Image (cartoon, rainbow, N blue to C red):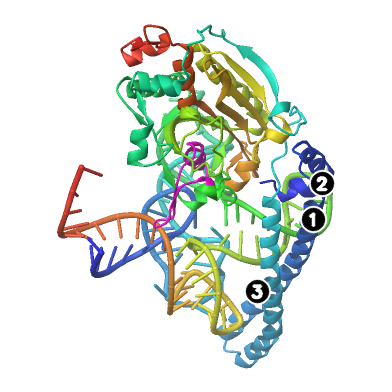
Amino acid sequence: MLTINQIRENKNFVIERLKVKNFKADEIIGKILLLDSSRREIQTKTDSRQNEMNIISKEIGELMKYGKREEAEAARQKTYSLKEEIKVLSDKIIPIENELKNEIIKLPNLPHKSVPHGKSAEENVTVLQGGIMPEISDKALPHWDLIKKYDIIDFDLGIKLTGAGFPVYLGKGAKLQRALISFFLDEGVKAGYREVIPPIMVNEDSGFGTGQLPDKEGQMYHATLDNFYLIPTAEVPVTNIYRDVIMNAEVLPVKNIAYTPCFRREAGSWGAHVRGLNRLHQFDKVEIVQIAHPDFSYESLNDMVNHVESLVARLDLPYRIIRLCGGDMSFTSALTYDFEVWAAAQKRWLEVSSVSNFESFQANRLKCRFKEKGDKQTKLVHTLNGSALALPRIVAAILENNQTEEGIKVPKVLVPYTGFDMIN
RNA sequence: GGAGAGAUGGCAGAGUGGUCGAAUGCGGCGGUCUCGAAAACCGUUGUUCCGCUAUCGCGGGACCGGGGGUUCGAAUCCCCCUCUCUCCGCCA
């Protein structure tokens, strides 16, 4: 969420920037500024009354100490009207504060200046395309057929155990999964990330901190008995490690990497293009998270993009990097790069990673701050995260692109992890 | 699941109605001493909001798990909630 200072001091700038996200902010911001000024007015008044009150109370204490009961009683009389006034004022301020917060929460993050205008995915900008497009025969099968042919992933069995979108990985399919996870984690650790195994259920505070709650409540599985949420991404627990934390500037950037299963209800988002592994309720993902100094967060973003690029490149997958336009970006992001890999049999690009800088938007919710050495005031950090990588679509692309008469060739970098170079 | 105890500043830990944002110790930071370091000594050391101020800063409010109440006055008394710990039981 944006800070009230940001809005107050740069009203027009905020409105202009939000237009890039096709968000009309004029009205909300007008309301916010109104609420803010009345809040401050009441606050000032309340504070000064409270001050008077405190002074009198102290006097009464003194008087009582010296046994001057009558004078104390006289002072006490003075407090009644004050007390009443304070109560009236502070009762007023609470609903104003609540409303103010409700309004501020409606504002999306400001897009970075490099974000292209645009309404939808069509207006995203491809910044780079890499890898070699595979040549496969016309008889090539989409991955949902290949997994049956080689008996490596079983959707029907998942339906039996749980429901649609909960596949069961079997034999070499399971091993491939484990190989990818290990490969991604090892590469991350080599790149300076600390490996973390977080809980995969979180409480409400964590859900709020990274922005899943309250708005996207319906996207998470909710264990109501204990009021825990199954995480939709490791971003949630890993970023929340830094909730309510004040760090020294020297420790930044902090880099964490985590593998977790991810759970998404995907309510209402099933359609033509989501067969097979393209969309699941449970999937595996390795996530990288950085907490960065505001002056250097875009260096962190580059660092992350380069890292993800090296992963898809080393898996020999054709890929492209896309800068999302304002209309296609998430509510919380300031700048997002998507990575897509080519799935040759489906003849489609599949999104396998989304790397974003949230600047101080999440940090403000998380109350994650830092202090410059020798500086007294705290400032909000910048948070970033990205998939490195999401497994199912990577698997889909590997299966489709690497299929041959003899079977599916395992990418070279994975062979040390799988122990086999062919799925057949 | 049963019984009990507790939640105070970065940590440990005092504080049961007034001058307590909070003793003390440890840690951190600055300094003295030293060739340097350690020790010792001195000082300093939370967050947040409002107002004034070009800035340093100054003044005021709030915060002792969260919420409500009693009182002129609450860390301290009362009520509710949450969480943690210990013992017993069960158990991967």
Distance from label 3 to label 1 (Cα)? Answer: 31 Å
Residue on which disc 1 sits: A33
Hey, what amino acid is under mark 3? Answer: Asn
- Helix, strand or loop for disc 3: helix
- Helix, strand or loop for disc 1: helix
Q: Quadrant of the C terminus of chain A?
A: top left
- Helix, strand or loop for disc 2: helix
The percent position of residue A33, horizontal first and vertical second, equals: 79, 55
**Marks 1 and 2 belong to one chain:** yes
Magenta-drawn segment: A219-244
Look at the numbered discs 1 and 2 and tell me whether their residues touch, using CB distance below 8 Å: yes
Q: Does the rendering let one see residue A188?
A: no
**Marks 2 and 3 belong to one chain:** yes
Hey, what amino acid is under mark 1? Answer: Leu
**Marks 3 and 1 belong to one chain:** yes
Q: Report the mark closest to the observer, 2 or 3.
A: 2
Distance from label 2 to label 3 (Cα)? Answer: 37 Å
The percent position of residue B8, horizontal first and vertical second, equals: 46, 58
Relative vertical location of residue A182 with respect to residue A136 in this rendering, above or below: below
Look at the numbered discs 3 and 1 and tell me whether their residues touch, using CB distance below 8 Å: no
